[in-house]
Image: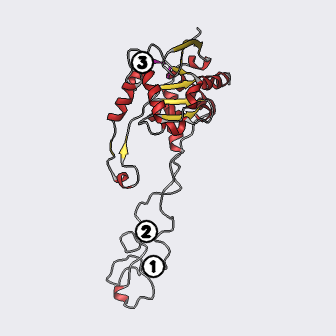
């Protein structure tokens, strides 16, 4: 079965009908997509933990029983032996922590190469499934006949935000852009004081062929992300491990997917 879809120009009009790459016929594998997302997400984490020797750099030893004091390790050479300063033990000042997080902990999840590639192909194919896109929460206009949305490569040359926004409206994506704007809210927690005060939902993803001027032009539109097809990852297509993100492909990006489908 050959999948076909419409190619749109910058005015939102159908330019011609084109054949989709074979990669869009990949079966939907939510299990692999979720595993691949967890593996990619864990690789972004920074190991954290205490110094294994924190609180232990001391000569403190316990006096043992028979002195009428607690048997906590105490520093030698204190001026007042009866009230020598405790050290090393968890409840002493400057002592070690009871159960500290260990920096040696393995926080990375692994996935086989072939499974990761199949997950990426499955996530790409999911962008053409209208039911999955709606299930993910995107709002589609009635005038959107089919997915995925393919646009002429001239779209990559736009330099202003207003031009990009205008094209997205002509492609009948205004309802999803309005949905994203309503999701903006203040983050709960300390992150408000660390340069990430607001949280916002994910909107349309724009996949371009090569490096283009579209990155700067579209970055100020809430929820819209732009990524090169060569740098396309599972966390772009399936944020949170849920496939079916509303995606706009340029004609140049499809040419690369043709090669990718043969791997």
In the depicted view, which residue is nearer to us: 77 or 134? 134
Report the residue at 54% width, 22% height from top: 151
Residue 96's disc number:
2
Q: Measure the C-alpha gap from mark 1 to mark 2.
A: 14 Å
On the image, numbered disc 3 is attached to which residue?
131
- Which numbered mark, 1 or 2, is in the foreground of this view? 2
Residue 128 shown in magenta: yes
> For residue 183, what is the image quadrant?
top left
Q: Measure the C-alpha gap from mark 3 to mark 2.
A: 55 Å
- Which numbered mark, 1 or 3, is in the foreground of this view? 3
> For residue 94, what is the image quadrant?
bottom left
Q: Locate the C terminus and report the quarter of the image it occupies.
A: top right
Which percent across, then down, holds residue 28? Answer: 51, 21
Q: Is residue 154 above or below residue 67?
A: above
Which percent across, then down, holds residue 258? Answer: 65, 21
Asked if the residue at tag 3 contacts the one at tag 1, i.e. Cβ–Cβ closer than 8 Å, the answer is no
Q: Earlier in the sequence, mark 3 or mark 2?
A: 2
Q: Earlier in the sequence, mark 1 or mark 2?
A: 1
- Which numbered mark, 3 or 2, is in the foreground of this view? 3
Which percent across, then down, holds residue 18? Answer: 59, 13
Q: Residue furthest top?
A: 1
């Amino acid at each position: 079965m050959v999948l076909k879809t419409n190619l749109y120009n910058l005015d939102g009009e159908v330019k011609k009908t084109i054949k989709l790459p074979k990669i869009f016929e990949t079966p939907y594998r939510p299990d692999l997509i979720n595993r691949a997302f967890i593996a990619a997400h864990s690789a972004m984490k920074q190991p954290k933990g205490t110094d294994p020797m924190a609180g232990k750099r001391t000569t403190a030893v316990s006096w043992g029983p028979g002195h009428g004091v607690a048997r906590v390790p105490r520093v030698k050479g204190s001026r007042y032996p009866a009230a020598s300063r405790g050290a090393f033990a968890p409840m002493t000042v400057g002592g070690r922590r009871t159960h500290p997080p260990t920096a040696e902990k393995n926080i990375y999840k692994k996935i086989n190469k072939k499974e990761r590639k199949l997950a990426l192909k499955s996530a790409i194919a999911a962008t053409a499934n209208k039911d999955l896109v709606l299930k993910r929460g995107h709002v589609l206009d009635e005038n959107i006949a089919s997915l995925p949305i393919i646009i002429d490569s001239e779209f990559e040359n736009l330099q202003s935000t207003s031009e990009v926004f205008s094209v997205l409206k002509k492609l009948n994506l205004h309802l999803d852009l309005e949905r994203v704007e309503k999701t903006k809210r203040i983050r709960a927690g300390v992150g408000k004081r660390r340069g990430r005060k607001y949280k916002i939902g994910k909107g349309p993803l724009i996949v371009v062929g090569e490096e283009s001027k579209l990155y700067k032009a579209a970055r100020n539109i809430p929820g819209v992300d732009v990524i090169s097809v060569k740098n396309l990852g599972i966390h772009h297509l399936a944020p949170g491990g849920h496939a079916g993100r509303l995606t706009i492909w340029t004609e140049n990006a499809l040419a690369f997917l043709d090669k990718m489908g043969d791997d």
